Image: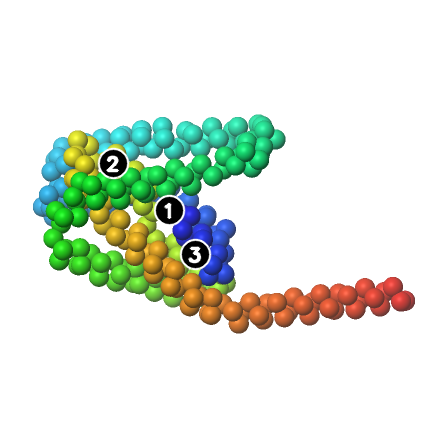
Amino acid sequence: MSSNVVMTRQAHGNPALTVVQSIIGQFLCPFLTPILLQMYLSSGAWYSKVLGNEDDNYSEIYKRVFKQLGLSLFIPMAIGQIVKNLFPGPTKKVFVDWKLSKMPSFALLTLIWQTFDQAFRSGAFKSVKPSNIVFMVFIFIALYFIWLGICFSTSIIWLPRKDTIACCYCCPAKALAMVVSVSAVMFIDLSPIEQSKLQIPAIIYQALQIAIGGVLTIGFRKWIRPFEEKEDSEKATSEGDQTKSGTSGVVS
């Protein structure tokens, strides 16, 4: 979410809409991911035996996912909102004056660092064929631009340009922190190398989306610049008319 907000702001989009879309997407992730993964388990891949073939797979998966996410995410967020509303003064002092608001960024960096470190240390990249990694890179680039094209062509019809940019950064994006958390909960009793092999696609996609998103900021800025200049001109004209109106009233 942080990278999407930063790139949206750099592209002169609507970062507030990016935050809202990211929160909605990450909220839906625990509900949709188990169903989507079960759809792919019938392919006979090596990971298809991890979850077994019991009839209660869905119930067990959802039980594990929401138990872990509830204890580590939903309950702390609810408590935080209660404390923030009951004690706004002390909360602001702790998070603003004492700079405790920087803690989530450090926690996220630690999680991402741990994911990359485990992938390299366990030798997960070496265990995957180079041709498979190259295939993933091209597939991910194609998927990114397909979703980007769909999102742009549908958003531009009824949304302002700033909102369109925000949608273009959120819809094709994948949050590495959520992928790591959900995959660690869904697949149990895995060795570090197996966990890393599951997370390799997300690692590659994360790097690609940041690289592509950074390049797209240049194009989006050029695309929205005429609109911003027109908006600034109309605003200046409106302010000038109000000033003349106020001056005329004083003279009268």
Front one among 32 and 196: 196
The answer to whether residue 37 is seen in the rendering is no
Identify the residue at horizontal 53%, vertical 72% (top origin): 226
Q: Which mark is residue 25?
A: 1
Identify the residue at horizontal 37%, vertical 59% (top origin): 213
Residue type beneath disc 1: Gly
Location of the C terminus by quadrant is bottom right
Q: Who comes first in sequence, dot 2 or dot 3? A: 3
Number of other residues with Cα within 10 Å of mark 3, as a class: few under 14, some 14 to 19, many 20 or more: many
How many tags in the picture?
3
Is disc 1 placed on a helix, strand or loop?
helix
User: Where's residue 21, x and y in %?
Assistant: 42, 49
Side of 133 where 2 appears, left or right: right
Tags 2 and 1 touching, CB below 8 Å? no
Identify the residue at horizontal 57%, vertical 70% (top origin): 229
Q: Nearer the viewer, mark 2 or mark 1?
A: 2
Residue type beneath disc 2: Ala
Distance from disc 3 to disc 1, alpha carbons, whole Å, reads 17 Å
Is 249 located above or below residue 84 in the figure? below
Residue bearing the label numbered 2: 184
Q: Which mark is residue 7?
A: 3
Distance from disc 2 to disc 1, alpha carbons, whole Å, reads 19 Å
Q: Quadrant of residue 218?
A: bottom left
